[in-house]
Amino acid sequence: MGWRTLVITAAKVVVAGPNGGVFIYSGAPAFGNLVSTDVAVGGTDPFGNTYLPGKTEYSVSVIAPHKVTAINIFQSTISWQTAPNPGGSFGAISSINAVSQSVVGLPPLSMTIGQGNTGEAVTFADPVVAPVVATAPGTGVAESWHSLGTLAGYTITRAQYRLNVMGEVEFDISVNATGVNALNVNFSTTLASPYLPLASYIQPLATNLAIASWTASPPRIGITSGGVVTHSFMTNQPSGSNVGFFSMPTT
């Protein structure tokens, strides 16, 4: 339809169609005069200017061969790109990328600065791409739960320990009394040396027994500095469960 006026005022502008887009030129539409585009797909305009997909601002050098610098926003990336001339191919020199954490192998946020003195891009990325886990002592592999073994007079639902990322030992214990039991029964497994406490340690356990049924002290776990794990409970205890999850410092 050609040029009708130097100023267009509108409440709404709609650009639609497979080749739709917004093209802004400095001066008459011509080679080297393209300064801004907003398009879904990149290409070349009728005057030979190469343009990028997304929202882009272009700056053309006044010095031959008129190198083009572009700032582009497309999908989840902001990039700074250059082309040797208005009709040349663009290449990214720096970028900031924000991607979903569900994308395997990619960090949630990264920034790449390209073509430094070494000739290679430098990338700064969010290092949190997976949960931090403890390492099993002396192995270099992820820590896992270790069994405390058996406990005389008790049915064991869980009796395990592991090293956490804070350098403490976690215990997860759930045992159920099956009858009258003696005081201070040791678990059959002794803690290995990397899991030993700084000093002997005592931890109360929760119980489903009424206080009136206690004839001695409440149930508790004791860990000696040598790694012996003892379950202490009241004498003549009726059937009931003792449960505890706790952590303790190690040597």
Image (cartoon, rainbow, N blue to C red):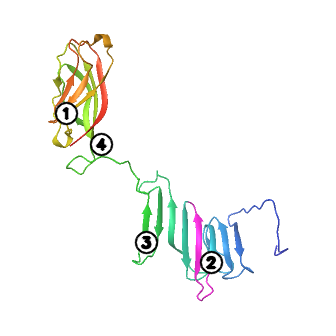
Q: CB under 8 Å between callouts 4 and 1?
A: no
Does the magenta run of residues contain 12? no
Q: Position of residue 143 (x, y in %)?
A: 27, 44
Quick check: 20 left or right of 107? Answer: right
Quick check: 233 left or right of 11? Answer: left
Mark 1: secondary structure: loop
Q: Residue under circle 4?
A: 164
Residue at the limit of the structure toward the right, as seen here: 4
Give the quadrant of the C terminus: top left
Quick check: 242 left or right of 18? Answer: left
Q: Amino acid at mark 1?
A: Ser
Q: Marks 1 and 3, how far apart in space?
A: 54 Å
Q: Residue under circle 2?
A: 59
Q: Marks 2 and 3, how far apart in space?
A: 23 Å
Q: Nearer the viewer, mark 2 or mark 1?
A: 1
Residues shaded magenta:
60-75
Q: Residue under circle 1?
A: 200
Q: Marks 4 and 2, how far apart in space?
A: 54 Å
Q: Position of residue 101 (x, y in %)?
A: 47, 52
Q: Residue under circle 3?
A: 121
Circle 1 packing at 10 Å, graded few (<14), some (14-19), many (20+), is some
Mark 2: secondary structure: strand
The structure residue drawn at horizontal position 23% and vertical position 16%, both measured from the top left corner, is 234
Mark 3: secondary structure: loop
Which one is earlier in the sequence, the residue at label 2 or at label 3? 2
Q: CB under 8 Å between callouts 2 and 3?
A: no
Q: Amino acid at mark 2?
A: Ser
Which one is earlier in the sequence, the residue at label 4 or at label 1? 4
The structure residue drawn at horizontal position 67% and vertical position 77%, both measured from the top left corner, is 34
Quadrant housing residue 183: top left
